[in-house]
């Protein structure tokens, strides 16, 4: 009876083992589930992604050399102004007096010079005919030269005083928008103070920086995309200017991107994310998630004859979503594993899912 029970137990054990082996073989024959992507070379547009800040393409700050008292204000911040329109008027009695005095001196010296110039011309003719002495001639010549010097000096002083006086009337030097006008009527303005700024915001520049590795392939006219803080839509522009000298602090080369601002939504000083094209090449771009890191090396898996083959790769250009992979073993139309790769070992059987 004992022998019979022992034989039955062994038979059951053998049947169980056989069932488990069958299940394992069935599982191995199906392979590990993966999803794939065909590898195809494509044009890779390299992008520099950095932060930037906006500024108007044209901007004029007016600084009063003389100062004065605010007599009249015709505009407010945000107003549109045309070139030549009077923005504000300053008043300064000393500036006006200096102008009037310089003008009177110049007119007087000019009249004196005209008289002495005619007189000198006559005496010069008489001297050439030897009708007057050399001393008389030289006296007239000295008087003429002194008068000439006086009129030139007084003219320079007059023109400077005239400009100071005329600059008390602050006019727009370009058509645009009034900004930084923070004055009140009858306020005393100090010498060399900024009184107003006019910006032409029809075109905007975005300042950012690129590294030494990117500057060599960057050119004026390269395309750029700008994502501005506070504005839903993205703007597109071109590289307007490249500084060939690196910033001494961050070692970046400053570039400026020009974008149209016809709607006027972009304001001075806005922060933005800037993506600038810095060159292109042909290569293989794959999802970053397809890359497996093992022992500090990067690998991808491809499917060959129903098996996974592990290929060691180098990383090339990278953007936010994709990574360029570099390897002599990568060629067109390979089946690249993009899901399930982290469970694979080299030469594992696989089951490709749709």
Image (cartoon, helix red, strand yellow):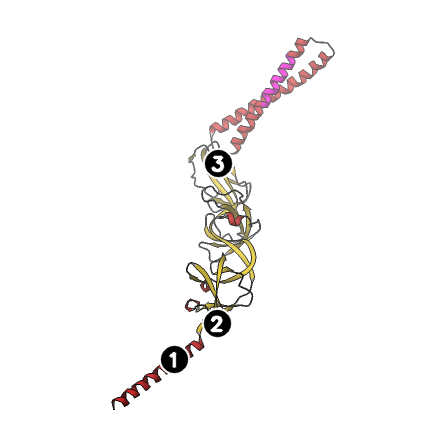
- Which percent across, then down, holds residue 217? 56, 50
Residues at badges 3 and 2 in contact (C-beta under 8 Å)? no
Residues at badges 1 and 3 in contact (C-beta under 8 Å)? no
Q: Estimate the spatial distance between the alpha carbons at disc 1 and disc 3, rounded to whole Å.
A: 91 Å
Q: Estimate the spatial distance between the alpha carbons at disc 2 and disc 1, rounded to whole Å.
A: 21 Å
Residue at image location 51% in from the left, 31% down from the top: 164
Q: Is residue 144 magenta?
A: yes
Q: Is residue 310 magenta?
A: no
Vertical side of 253 occupied by 146: above or below: above
State the residue position of label 2. Answer: 307
- Classify residue 62 as left or right of residue 5: right
Mark 1 or 3, nearer chain start? 1
Mark 3, mark 2: which one is toward the viewer? 2
State the residue position of label 3. Answer: 63
View extreme (bottom): residue:
1
View extreme (front): residue:
3
View extreme (left): residue:
2
Vertical side of 18 occupied by 134: above or below: above
State the residue position of label 1. Answer: 21
- Which percent across, then down, holds residue 344? 43, 68
Mark 3 or 2, nearer chain start? 3
Q: Main secondary structure of the magenta part?
A: helix
Check disc 1 and report its element: helix, strand or loop: helix
């Amino acid at each position: 009876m004992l022998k019979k029970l022992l034989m039955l137990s062994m038979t059951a054990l053998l049947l169980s083992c056989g069932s488990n082996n069958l299940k394992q073989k069935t599982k191995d024959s199906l392979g590990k589930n993966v999803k794939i992507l065909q590898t195809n070379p494509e044009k890779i547009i390299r992008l520099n992604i950095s932060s930037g800040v906006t500024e108007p393409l044209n901007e004029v700050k007016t600084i009063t050399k003389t100062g004065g008292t605010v007599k009249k204000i015709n505009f407010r911040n945000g107003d549109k102004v045309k070139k030549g329109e009077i923005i504000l008027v300053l008043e300064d009695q000393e500036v006006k007096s200096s102008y009037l005095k310089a003008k009177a001196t110049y007119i007087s010296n000019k009249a004196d010079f005209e008289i002495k110039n005619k007189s000198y011309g006559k005496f010069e003719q008489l001297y050439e005919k030897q009708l007057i002495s050399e001393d008389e001639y030289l006296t007239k010549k000295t008087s003429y030269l002194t008068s000439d010097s006086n009129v030139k000096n007084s003219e320079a002083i007059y023109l400077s005083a005239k400009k100071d006086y005329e600059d008390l009337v602050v006019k727009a030097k370009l058509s645009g928008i009034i900004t930084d006008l923070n004055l009140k009527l009858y306020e005393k303005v100090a010498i060399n103070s900024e009184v107003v700024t006019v910006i032409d915001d029809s075109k905007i520049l975005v300042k950012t920086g690129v590294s030494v590795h990117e500057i060599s392939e960057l050119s004026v006219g390269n395309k750029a995309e700008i994502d501005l803080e506070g504005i839903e839509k993205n703007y597109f522009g071109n590289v307007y200017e490249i500084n060939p000298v690196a910033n001494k602090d961050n070692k970046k080369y400053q570039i400026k991107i020009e974008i149209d601002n016809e709607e006027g939504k972009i304001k001075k000083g806005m922060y933005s994310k800037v993506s600038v094209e810095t060159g292109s090449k042909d290569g293989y771009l794959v999802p970053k998630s397809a890359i497996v890191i093992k022992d500090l090396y990067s690998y991808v898996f491809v499917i060959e004859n129903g098996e996974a083959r592990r290929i060691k790769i180098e990383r090339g250009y990278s953007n936010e979503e994709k990574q360029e992979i570099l390897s002599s073993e990568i060629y067109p139309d390979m089946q690249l594993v993009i899901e399930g790769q982290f469970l694979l070992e080299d030469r594992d059987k696989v089951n490709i899912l749709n």
